[in-house]
Amino acid sequence: MSENKTRPTDQNVIDFLNTVENQTRRKDGFALLEIMQEETGEQAVMWGSSIVGFGLHHYKYETGREGDMPLVGFSPRKQSMTLYIMPGFDEYEGLLADLGKHKIGKACLYVNKLADVDEDALRQLIKRAYEHVKTWNQ
């Protein structure tokens, strides 16, 4: 079985965020760093070359495949700011309705810029998702 490509690294989060070319995305990255640290109480860790993650969840599938992932995280991608909300969004319809302009994937929340979303709803979503995934570790 192959190892996961995305693993924690020793790369400095601040150095990484300073390399983000798009000025708005860079500014939003620093804002998300602060928001996620406040809402999770965790220090940021780089996962792979472009994901800023908070906390650690070890998983093991019935197939035997296992690995680690951050409890929540984000990546300032060229297209949009990508937030990794591991539980998905089924339980968060009310918060998503209050969030503002966004798109969702299976476990990803995409926002063009933080100015498009309600910060309180975003903070609640991050906190609830983080707490939800933490229960998977128990």
Image (spheres, rainbow, N blue to C red):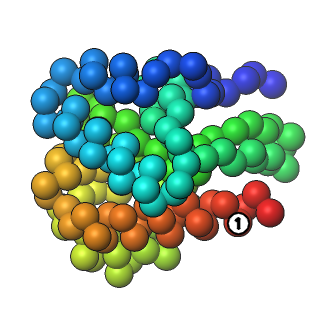
Residue 112: x %, y % from top left: 18, 46
Q: What's the amino acid at mark 1?
A: Thr
| Mark 1 neighbour class, 10 Å CA radius: few under 14, some 14 to 19, many 20 or more | few
When the figure is inspected, residue 50 is found, relative to residue 33, above or below; the finding is above
Q: Is residue 108 left or right of residue 40?
A: left
Tell me the residue at 78%/39% (across/down). 66
Residue 108 seen in the current view: no
Q: Is residue 123 left or right of residue 118?
A: right
Q: Residue furthest bottom?
A: 94
Residue 52 sits in quarter? top left
Say which element carries label 1: helix
Placement of 2 over or under 138, stated as above or below: above
Name the residue located 15 percent from the left edge and 27 percent from the top edge: 22
Q: Position of residue 36 (x, y in %)?
A: 42, 52
Residue 116 visible? The answer is yes
Dividing the picture into quarters, in which one does residue 136 lie?
bottom right
Residue 51 picture location, percent across and down: 45, 32
Residue at 74% in and 37% down: 67
110 to 29, vertically: above or below: below
Asked whether 11 or 2 is in front, the reply is: 11
Tell me the residue that label 1 is attached to: 135
The number of numbered badges drawn on the structure is 1
- In this picture, residue 16 sits left or right of residue 84: left
Compared with 17, 92 (above or below) is below
Q: On the rendered image, what quadrant is the N terminus found in?
A: top right
89 or 128, nearer to the observer: 128
